[in-house]
Image: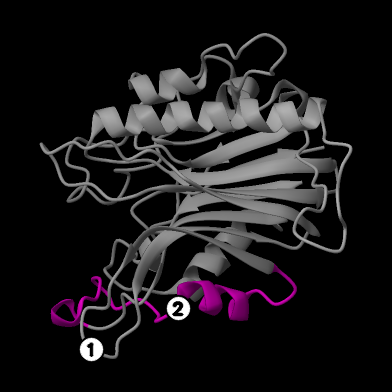
Amino acid sequence: MRLVNWNIQWGRGVDGRVDLRRIVDEARRLCDFDVLCLQEVTRGFHGDAAAGGLPGGPDADQFAALGALLPGYTVLSGIGADLPPARLGAPRRQNGNAIITRYPVGPVFRHSLPWPSDPTVKSMPRVALEAVLLSDIGPVRVTTTHLEFYSAPQRLAQAQALRDLHVEACGHAMRPSPHGDPSGPFAAVERPLAGLVCGDFNSAVDDPAYQRMLEPMPAGVPSFNDAWLARHGQVPHAPTVGVYDRVQWPQGPFACDFVFVTPDLATRLVRCDVDPQSAASDHQPVVVEFR
């Protein structure tokens, strides 16, 4: 299973140009991916700033545009910020995450993450998109997310929520309900123990949110491993932001995009790399491969 994780900044490169085809081409340059996990994918933010648009003028519906660029793949969306139209007759403005895969897709879950009040900074609602993928290495829970940037308390609460969701999923895996109605919404669903959480955590490795992800889980629940550490040991993380964009990241390069995996997946990990070349976003893509 080959997976690319990338905050694409709605397809806006360091050159200021929005180009989803370039995003897809760059991801394909890295590997023949089975799964593409993206953050900062938008709907309704097209047009100029006066009309509520984002810089560069993204597509009206980037989830649909990515689907058109990737025939044979399923595009799943998870919306965090869902805002009213900027003007009468315009679509709602939405920002969130996507899981794009050529694997058969089992149950899908969209989890709103905690958003405790923090009046000291601006912030926006966040979401974790979870899908059970019937992959070449067996059923895997793939979750992608994008944690809060400005508020450290919100970010830490969101990291804890990701841990709680993992505990919940493992409970379903170890103690599945014997009940189910395949003809309706009460159908039994599978949430396997094997799990992967990836995304933009807006956390350096010394940030409490990153460290919270690696704390031991309750007894009987597999803890998360950082895929980079599982593959590279104590080699410092390669930077995922600030490599080319020094305007938004004046502090310079550092790592804030991670892939966390359960121990069974860590033993199957054969690749975890950060691409140093792409300038198609302000973030660098992360590639992992399992066999």
- Res 290 quadrant in image: top right
Q: Is residue 121 magenta?
A: no
Which amino acid type corresponds to the residue marked 2 in the rendered image? Asp
Residue shown at the point (30%, 36%) measured from the top left = 253
Q: Which mark is residue 88?
A: 1
Nearer to me, 226 or 93: 93
Q: Is residue 28 left or right of residue 60?
A: right
- Res 227 quadrant in image: top right
207 lies above or below 220: below
> Circle 2 sits on which residue?
61
x and y percentages locating residue 154 in the rendered image: 30, 33
Which amino acid type corresponds to the residue marked 1 in the rendered image? Leu
Which residue appears farthest toward the top when viewing the image?
219
> What are the residue bounds of the magenta stretch?
48-73
Query: Could you tell me how far apart the alpha carbons at marks 1 and 2 are, in whole angstroms?
Result: 18 Å
Residue shown at the point (60%, 14%) measured from the top left = 217
As helix, strand or loop, the secondary structure at mark 2 comes to loop
Which residue appears farthest toward the left when viewing the image?
120
Residue shown at the point (38%, 49%) measured from the top left = 283
Q: Is residue 56 left or right of residue 266?
A: left
249 lies above or below 65: above
Q: Earlier in the sequence, mark 1 or mark 2?
A: 2
x and y percentages locating residue 34 in the rendered image: 73, 56
x and y percentages locating residue 150 in the rendered image: 22, 39
Number of residues whose C-alpha sits closer than 10 Å to that of mark 2, classed few (under 14), some (14–19) or many (20 or more): some
1 and 2 marks in contact (CB < 8 Å): no
